[in-house]
Image (spheres, grey):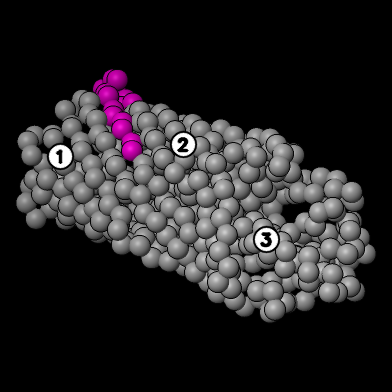
Amino acid sequence: MKTQFKSFNTSFKTITALGALVVTGSVFAGGFEKATTWSGRYSGVGSAAVGHVTGAESLYFNPAGLAGGTSNGDVSLNFSPTWAQYEGASATGVGGAVTQLKSDRVMSPVFGAVASYKPMPKLGVGAGLFVAGGSAADYGEVDFTNLGNTEFKPTLKTKLSLSELSVGAAYEITDGLRFGASWRYSIVKATLCQPKVPNPPNNPSLALVGACLNDLNDKNSAGFRVGMQYDASSWGAGVNVRTPIKFKAEGKAAILLSQANGEGQPSAANGDGAVASISSEFPLQIEVGGFVDAATDMRLFLAYGYTKYSGNEKLTQVVASTSSDTFLNWKDQNHFRLGAEYNGMGMPIRVGYVLVTGVTNAKNAAPTFSSPGTGHVMTLGSGYKFSEALALDLAGEYSFASGKGVAPATVGDYKSNGYVLHTGVTYNF
């Protein structure tokens, strides 16, 4: 038992680093966010909304749109339940043999509730609360029985949510030309659990460790969005800039150490119950895009976005006042959006596609990370107007990504996929 505790003490920084790394995984291609987060209306065209969005949803897509539209204001309620599943490689077999793990399909309750008002024809203001990023992967208990005479089954999961409370305003300087800005109060919440595989595997003198960082949370009020739009009726363009925010999410560590009898036991002496935190950054993002009327009833959309994830070189974690860094070597992310809307059949038909370049380095691949490869998003949507004031919008989404992990990560296949039902109800007044 002393040997086990000694082994655990010498690797505790590595264990907490592995646990903290789970927060970097979002669904499909990387970073802290999905390519299409919420919106029954704009998800149908792949969220290529930066050049034409108007009303309350502009708070998220481009605040300049708060000054657009023909109504005096609107309220938009959106719910986008997201069912995601991950697959990855882990050295849980005898002699370090690789096992392919597949997570449960977990639902994340993504939402957006926003409102806007135009006190003057050229001035618009808005406020709302919405999800801006996050992920959820749950493999349940990972079976380490093959590593030796043990029934130790620690939990492998991650749950991350990044929500924003936002207020903004925009002004139309001249016909079609709008500028806007919004302030973001960001709320980060996470629970992270990652087992530690001993090296060499199936060595009974080394401890198996389950490390969880629970109830991590932080708030940041230093974020902004700034945007511009030009709408020439038959075509238009826009740009949206999201400033970076730093966060330090604090919670408690839960340390489960394998015992000689093969069972697990909390270890207060080695960090169980201690204060824990992780520090990172929700990075700078710039998106530009536009639309053009290709025919009387057909509008096409295009957008390109750049997210500076290369600034996230490392995560800093602190457990029981002990600080350590985990180097990520992330790559900048690029995304390309294509969308189309046809209005010649009474109800709109919307289609969208998004290509997202990978952020996760193949050397840092893990089962709860986003896959180290290119992500793809396909959407199909429509809507129905009950009256000039009330509208319902729906869109379905399928997203996927895959890649190979390379040493020093466990070599194997890493995949992720998800289904989303985007719903939105808008009332114009």
Distance from the alpha carbon under mark 3 to that under mark 1 = 50 Å
Q: Determine whether the residue tagged by mark 1 lies in a helix, strand or loop.
A: strand
Q: Are marks 2 and 1 in contact (CB under 8 Å)?
A: no
Q: Amino acid at mark 3?
A: Ile
Residue at 65% in and 43% down = 365
Dot in front, 3 or 1: 3
Dot in front, 3 or 2: 3
What secondary structure is the stretch in magenta mostly built from?
Answer: strand
Q: Amino acid at mark 1?
A: Arg
Residue 34 in percent (x, y) is at: 48, 45
Q: Which mark is residue 15?
A: 3
Residue at 30% in and 55% down = 223
Q: Is residue 394 above or below residue 3?
A: above
Q: Amino acid at mark 2?
A: Gln
Residue 371 in percent (x, y) is at: 61, 41
Residue 258 in percent (x, y) is at: 81, 70
Q: Which residues are magenta?
A: 286-300
Location of mark 2 (residue): 333
Location of mark 1 (residue): 178
Q: Earlier in the sequence, mark 3 or mark 1?
A: 3
